[in-house]
Each structure stands twice: as C-alpha cells, then as structure tokens.
Image (tube, rainbow, N blue to C red):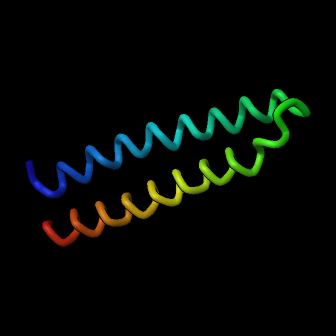
Amino acid sequence: MSDIDALKDEVKKLNARATQKKMDLHDLSEELPQNWQSILRVAQETYDAYKTLTEKRAELKALETASA
C-alpha cells in the first residue's frame, strides 16, 4: 500500500471519528441541562478530532500534489 493510500485510509477513519464526536456534542446539547459537566470534555474531544482531521487532509493534499 502506498503512502497516499495509507493516508487516505487514515483520513477516512479520522473523518468517521470526527463525525461521531460532532454527533456526541449535538446529543449533549439536546440533553442540556443534564450532563452539563461534560460540555468541556466533549467539546475538546470534538475540537481535537477535527483538528487532527484537518491536519491529515492537508498532509494528504500535499502528498498528492507532490506526486502529481
């Protein structure tokens, strides 16, 4: 498997994780005021997931551009 293919797989998994974190945050917002203590943790997890996804997408784009 090439580096690009491996990175594409990683981006796909990170995208699924980020989407799940987004849904967790959405679900938490609908449950408020219950579980309000979880807001910061869930928001940070969501932020981290999207930050990592954005970084890997940029890495993939650079790798694809370099190999073109």
Please state the total of marks drawn on the protein image.
Answer: 0
Q: Residue 7, percent across and down?
A: 25, 53
Q: Residue at x 35, y 42 (%)?
A: 12
Q: Locate residue 64: give its quadrant.
A: bottom left
Q: Residue at x 32, y 65 (%)?
A: 59
Q: Residue at x 81, y 29 (%)?
A: 30
Q: Residue furthest toward the left?
A: 1
Question: Could you tell whether 67 is left or right of 19 in the image?
Answer: left
Q: Residue 25, percent across and down?
A: 69, 38
Q: Residue 51, percent across and down?
A: 52, 60
Q: Residue 11, percent across and down?
A: 35, 48
Q: Residue furthest toward the right?
A: 33
Q: Locate residue 35: give its quadrant.
A: top right
Q: Residue furthest toward the bottom?
A: 66
Viewer-nearest residue: 24 or 41: 41
Question: Could you tell whether 42 is left or right of 62 in the image?
Answer: right
Q: Residue at x 14, y 66 (%)?
A: 68
Viewer-nearest residue: 67 or 54: 54
Question: Could you tell whether 31 is left or right of 21 in the image?
Answer: right
